[in-house]
Image (cartoon, coloured by chain):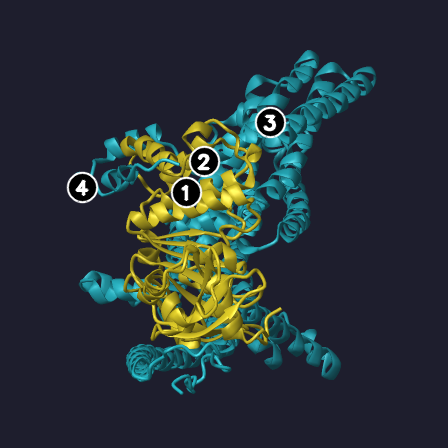
Chain colours: A cyan, B yellow
Amino acid sequence: MSTSTDAAPNAEMNAPKSTKPGFLERMKERFADPNPILVKELQTLFRLKLFIRFLYLSTAGLAFVILMMGASTASGMNPAKAGQVLFQVFFSLIAGIVALVAPAAASTALTTERETETYESLILTGMDPAKIVTGKFLANFVAFTVALVAFFPLVGVGFLFGGITPTDVLFAFLGILLSLAIAVSFGLSVSARVRSTRVSLLLSITTSAPISMMIWGMITAIGEAVDHDWELVTEGPFWFAEALSQRFFELDTFTFAFVFPILLTILLVWFFLASAIAGVRHSSEDRNTPFKIWSLFAVPVGWAILGALTGVLRPRDWDEALPIFSFCFGFFMLFLALLFANEPPLPPRTYEEKVEDGGFWVRFRSRFGPGAAPTARFATLLLIAAAAGGMAIQMVVATFIDPAALRHETVLGNAMVMAGNCAVSIWALYFASYLRVTARSAVLSRVIVIGSLFLLSLVPIFLLATMDPTAFRDADDHLPWAMRFVPFAHIMTGFEASDDRDLTRLIEGIPALAFYGGLAFLLFAMLERRCAAIATNVRQYRASRNAAADAAYAARNAQREAAKRAREEAQAAMMAASATPASAASPDPAPNPGSSEEPSTES
Amino acid sequence: MIKVQGISHNFGKLAVLQDVWFDVPKGEVFGFIGPNGAGKTTTLRMIATLLEPQQGRILVGGYDVVDHPRQVRQILGFMPDGFGVYKNVTVHEYLSFFASAYGIDRSARERTVRAVMELTDLITLTDRMVSDMSKGMTQRLAIARTLLHDPEVMILDEPANGLDPRARIEMRDLIEQLRGLGKTIMLSSHILTELSDMVTSVAILEKGRVLATGDVNEIQQKLRPERAVKIRLLEYPEGGESAFLAVPQVRNLERGPDGALRILYQGGDEAVAEIVRAAVDARLSVIRVEPERNDLEHIFLEVTRGEVQ
C-alpha cells in the first residue's frame, strides 16, 4: 500500500478555472474530449462477444434470405423488377430489425446500470443527465449503424438485377437511419422510466412492434396514394427512395418526403430524449423546461405542416379540407395539453432558490416556469398561439395561392374549429393539472381526462340514440341540443359552416365553446388557488421543520452534555469513596461487580 | 460533518427508520452498525442523496441533502454495497471514465487517476480487466472511484462484506490512510469485528431506531463503567491478588480457566498503568497484560440486550 499522502488529487481538482472559452474553443474541446459515456459504452460493446455474434449471425441470416429471394424472383420476373423487389425486401428486413431490436437494446441502457448499482455511482458524479442520456443514445446509435454498415454489401445483390440506383440505396439508408434514431431514443425513454430490465424490454417491444408496423403501413399507403402523381414504379414502403432520387428538386417531394420526415424525426427524438433526461434528473431539479423548449419547436413544425398541406391542395378542396386539418391539429394540441399536465404543485427546490436569487427576467420567467400553475399558464398561452398560428398560416398560404377561392365561410368555420380546439384542450389541461395536484398521480389524472372526453362524446350520442333516434336525421341541417356540448361539436359546426356556406351553423357550436371555456376558467381559478395554498403550507412546514430540528438538536445536545457531566461526577464520587477505605486487601472480591455496593474489605 | 436529525422513512406500511438521530464529527471514522434489515443502507442512501427522508433532516457539510443534493454530491463519495463497477473495462479505463464524469479537466485527469491508483495500490493493475479482479481488488477500485473528486466525506456501505482476511487488513490500512488525509469516513457493517479496530465513534441501529451513538469509549463507559484487563503472571504467589485490589480503580478480580487474572476496573488507560505499577511494586512477575478486545461486540450486545440474532 502506498503511503504517499501527496497523492491526493486536490491540487488538480482545485486549480483555478480560466475565463469562459469561446464557441470554437468549446467545440474543439468537445471533439478532443468526447462524451465519456459514449467512449465507455463503445469500449464495452466492441469487447462484447454477444455483439460480434449478433453481427455475423444477423448478416448471415439476412444474406440467406436475400439470396433465396433473389433466386426465386430471378426466374419469374424481369430483372429490373426483381432488383426492385430485392431492394424492398432488403430494406424492409433491416427496418424490421431496427424496429424490434434497437428499442429493446436501448431500453436496457439505464436499467442494467440500475440493476448492477453502477447507476448510483454515475448519478453521484454530478454528471449532467443530458450528457448521460446523449452518451447512451449516441452509443446505441453508433452500434446499430455499425451493424447496418455490415449488412450494407448485401444490397449489392439488387444491383446485379438492375432497376435500382445508388441514390435509391442512399435515400433508403437515410430513412433507416432516421427510424433508428427514433427507435433508440424511444427505447432510452422507456429505460429511464422503468426500474427492471425485464419490464423495460417487454414494454419497449410490445409498444414499438405494433407502432412500427402501423407507421410502415401508413408509409406504404402514402406511397400508393402518390405513386400515380409522382410517376413512381417502385411498390413497397421504400417508395420514397425512388421519389427522392427522381424528384428531389420538386417542391412537393422535397417538402413531404425529405424535409418533413427529417423535422418529424428531430421532433420525436428530441421528445424521447427530453423524456429520458427528465427520468434521470433528480426530483429537486427542473424536469419540465426541456419539454417547454421542445414545444416551442414542435408548434411551428405543426404550423409548417398545416401550411404545406394547405398549399398542396386544390383551392376547391379548401372548404372541406381546412376544417379537417384544423381538427387533426386539435389532437396535437390535446397532446400538448396533457403533456404539460404532469407538474407537481410546486416548482423544484433548486429552481425556487434560483428564482429567489435571480433578477427581474428570472422572476418573470418563473411565472411560466416549473410547477403546476406556472406550467399551465405557459401551456395556455402556447395552445392559444398554436391555434391562432395554425389558423393564420392556413389563411396566409391560401391567400397567397388563390385569394379569390378562399371564402369567408371557410375562414370563420375554420376559426370555429380552432377556437373549439383551444377551449377543449385548455379545459383538458386544467382538469388534468388540477387532478394531478389533488390526486398526486399523473397517470390517473390523464386517464380520467381522456375517459371524460370519451364519456362527454359518447353519452349524448347514446342518449339521443335511445331516447330520440329521429334527432340524427336532421343533424345535417341543425345539430341536436344534446350534441351541442360534446367535445367535437365545434368541429361539426365549423365544418358544416364552411362546407354548406351557412354561417348560422356556427351558432350551434357556441354552447360547446362556452361550456369548455367556462369550465377551463373555473378550473384555472381552482388550480391557482390550490397551488398557492400548497405553497404556503409547504413553506410553513419547511420553516417549522428546520426550526424544530434545530431546537430538538440543541435540546438533545444539552441533555447529552448534562448526562455526561452527571456520569463524570458520579464516577469521581465513586473513585473518591473507594480511595478512602483501605482497600487493604480482602482476598475475597466483591460479589456483585459493578454494583454501587463496595466490598467491605476494611475489617 | 454529517448531522442526521430525526429522520423517519416507511416503505409502504413497513417503518424502516424511526426518529433516527446521530452526528458524525469531522475527521472521524464512524461505524454504523446493526443487524441485516436494521435500516443502515436506507440511511446511507439518504445521506448520499439517493433517497429522500419522509421526515426529518440530514445535513452534510451544512447542506441539506434534500434541498441541495448537488452541493452534497460534490463533497461526498459513496460506495454502495455491491461496489457498483463496470465489468468490461480495464482499471485505468474505469477510473478515467469516472474522472471525466466528475468533470475533472482533461489535462489533470491522467495525473488524478494515477494519484488515486497509487493511493489505493492499484497502480500495478492498470490494464487489468475489472471482470478478472478479485473481490478485494474490486473493492479497492470502488474506493478509488469515490476518491477521484477528492471528497471530504466518504460513505462506505458494508465495505468489508465478503472479503478474505488479507483484503480486510488492506482495507483497514487504506481507511487509516484516508483518515490521515483528513477525510470523514462513515462505514456500515453487521460484522462487528470488522469495525472494532477502525472506528472512533459509532451509531447502533436496530429495527430502524438508533439505540446508542457517540464515541466508542463514551458509550462503553455509559453502559458499563467497568472494563477488564487480563494479567498473566509467571507465578501466582499466595495473597498476590491483594496488590491489585489495593489499586483504587480496581473493582473485582477473578482467576480465569487459563490461570490468568481478569481484573475489572473503572477508568481509562491510566487505571491499567496503575494496575501494572502495583504488580511491579509487589514484585509480581508480569509476563503479559491484555486489555479486553472487541469492545464493540460487548457494546452491541449490551445495547441490544441480546435481542438481535
Contact (Cβ within 8 Å) of mark 3 with mark 1: no
Tell me the residue at 36%/48% (across/down): B176
Q: Is residue B213 visible?
A: no
User: Which of the chains bears the disc numbered 2?
Assistant: B
**How far across and down, in percent of the image, does residue A426 sit?**
45, 69
SS for dot 1: helix
Closer to the camera: disc 3 or disc 1? 1
User: Taking B63 as reference, is A79 above or below it?
Assistant: above
Determine crowd level at label 2: few under 14, some 14-19, many 20+ residues with C-alpha closer than 10 A. many
Towards the viewer: B192 or A176 = B192
The residues bearing labels 4 and 3 have C-alpha atoms spaced at a distance of 44 Å
Q: How many marks?
A: 4
Q: Which residue is mark 3?
A: A147
Q: Chain of mark 4?
A: A
Identify which amino acid the numbered label 3 is placed on: Ala
> For mark 1, what is the residue?
B145
Q: Quadrant of the N terminus of chain A?
A: top left
C-alpha span from label 4 to label 2: 26 Å
Decide which of tag 4 and tag 3 comes sooner along the chain. 4
- Circles 2 and 1, Cβ within 8 Å, touching? The answer is yes
Q: Which mark is residue A16?
A: 4
Badge 3: how crowded within 10 Å, few (<14), some, or many (20+)? some
| Same chain shared by disc 4 and disc 3 | yes
Of residues A184 and A510, the one drawn nearer to the viewer in this rendering: A184
Using the image, determine if residue B149 lies above or below residue A57.
below
Say if mark 1 contacts mark 4, CB within 8 Å: no
- Disc 1 from disc 4: Cα separation: 23 Å
- In the figure, residue B197 lies in which quadrant? bottom left
The reply to whether dot 4 and dot 3 touch (C-beta < 8 Å) is no
Please identify, in this view, whether the residue under mark 3 or under mark 2 is nearer the observer: 2
Q: Amino acid at mark 1?
A: Arg
The percent position of residue A95, horizontal first and vertical second, equals 64, 34
